[in-house]
Amino acid sequence: MKYVNDHFKRLMLASPVNQSVLEHMKQDVDAFLPQFSDRVSSLSRWGHYYFCDEDGGRLIFDPKQPHRHQCSICGKVYRNDVLDGVWITFYRNRAVVLAQVSALIYCVTGEEKYRRYALNVIEFYAAHYTEFPLHNKENVMGSSYDDMKWGCGRIMPQNLNEAIVAIRFIATIEMLRDTLDDNWIAWVHQMLFREIFCLLCPQVREIHNISCWCLAAIGVMGLSLHDEEMIRFAFESPLNIHEQLSKGVTADAFWYEGSIHYNFFLLEGVSYLFLFSRLYDYDFGKKSTAIFERMLIQAYGYAFDNQYLPNPNDGWPNLNLRTFSYVYHTAARAFGEDSPVGNMVKLIEADPSPRTILPLSEPYYCGNSICMEQLLFNLDFDYAHYKPVPRQSALYPRSNFAMLRNKDWNVFLKYGLNGRSHAHPDIMEIEVMCRDQRISRDLSNAGYQARLCKEWHRKTISHSTVCWNGQDITSVSPGKCLHFDSSQVTAKAENVYDGVDYCRSLSIFGSELQDRFTAGGKEGVYDYFFHLESGFRLSHDMKIQEAELGFKENGYQHIQQVSQMLVEKEANLKAETDDLCFTVHIDLAPGQKLFLLKTLDNPVNQTRSTLLVRGRGKEQHFQMKITIHEKERKV
């Protein structure tokens, strides 16, 4: 088995569609690589800075504007040294990715200039690698691998990005291997990849997604270059890849950090290590293979029916399975077309939903539709023939997740955490999908250094859960599932705040969703939030008055248009889009007040309608019911 599919060249040349893709790739390469130029004195900076402080929008990377950084949402232009450094990171990543694309073009056309473009990039970084400053994302410098802080890179601002670059360099070499001189390979092995190995191996210090990326890069380099020391480190060192998967993946086949994005991000690195193990006949191990395969299959199972993904904890907004099709294509190259993973690829490619783009470490897609991995690995798959995989209600107790499903509803519940890493303070949050439309979703976050990430996205009240006394939830511990069946789930989380417990019961029967939430244990103000997506029109016949909520921090400062609904026992509101209509019924306990708010979306060029029920005391019970109504057809 070779890295590139045996039928790749023939199928690329035989199809007009693939020829069009090839021309698009040529345009991308020709616009960038002939002018590629880098300097070792240019310091790369962390990509999470590259977001607008006003609205959380990703800044636009323009290869021709190294000192001008414009928001993709509001158009504001930023100019500072930190963002110039992020531009360097993006420029280098673009060069490395386009080196892969250039090698792909050469494999189809045989045009020597594309081979030379790809090798020029690798040769530059190999010749000068140790001249690049050793630094981490906080811009802390190191004089050697012995005294460097954790998280260091040279080309890139941290070890994680350096590992990604290393794998992409090796992938480029694999495409061109038949044309490369042994002396050249030995030179780049010594000058570049041995140095990357020396950089990465002392930074594998814990069970973590970054450790997995470092191990994946080390293993891929070792297998491709027949470096036994690297291979042994990846598979036999104390925190080797088998240990990472065995201890870091829950019994539910989900990465312990509790983020859908990081679950897939981890799978990306492991997928390349697994593929190279197959390419070079290295035994990945029965147990690790089973864990890896089950993670890929399980991810399809916990997606919503429309293939969008629940989005608890850190990540990026609006992710769907097509966002990560490149991961499935890489794994399917190793497992084969007739495997369950091969079937997953076909199911994902059959979905008509547009792909959601990742703002950082983005892989190469042509027209945001066809990934490079599909072309190289699986162009000969018969995508018209696949086996449907039904989804059903499911409980993931070791991951603190549950999903309820019927023909009308998908309801996702997060009822606990497995630690602080990448956690959001949103225990007992729900995400709701109704007939393929999102009713309420997790916003995830903008880049970690963005102002609104800290002030809104990582705050309790931006999620559909309960907030006590205007403070963020403090627990990072697991919850407990008290009951689960195909239509109902009840979960409890203790000491969500010190001395405050939560219990939430959700049920779906036909067209009705019921939510019962109990929070209590200490005197205080209990705020129940339910956020509706920005596309919904909300109407009611209740009297209202302007109001204030009192709290001025932990996200409350960003709440807009606060109105109190002048009702005592119950309230009914109607929400609709062009395709969907439902009523929201809220039962109010004695003393509880209902508010209607506008809250920030992600990005914040849109706002959401949010319902807030406030109660005071030692314990509060909240009840909400959502009922779907058939839309009246206009004649």
Image (spheres, rainbow, N blue to C red):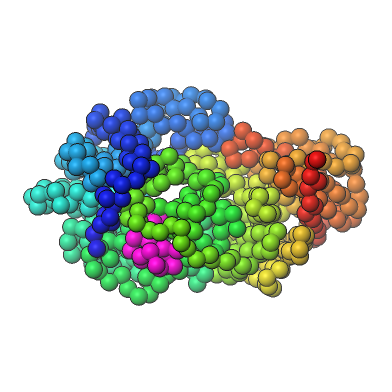
Q: Which of 614 and 142 is in front in this view?
A: 614
Whether residue 598 is visible here, answered yes or no, is yes
Q: Where is residue 31 in the image (x, y as percent from the top left)?
A: 31, 29
Query: How many labels were placed on the picture?
Result: 0
What's the magenta region? Answer: 327-344
Q: Which of 31 and 211 is in front in this view?
A: 31
Residue at x 27%, y 61% (from the top left corner): 276
Q: Position of residue 312 (x, y in %)?
A: 57, 54
* Left or right side of 266 for 29: left
Q: Residue 621 appears in which quarter of the rendering?
A: bottom right
Q: Residue 411 appears in which quarter of the rendering?
A: bottom right
Q: Which of 414 and 635 is in front in this view?
A: 635
Q: Position of residue 405 (x, y in %)?
A: 66, 64
Magenta-drawn stretch, dominant element (helix, strand or loop) = helix
Residue at x 52%, y 25% (from the top left corner): 76
Image quadrant occupied by the C terminus: top right
Q: Position of residue 533 (x, y in %)?
A: 68, 44
Image quadrant occupied by the N terminus: bottom left
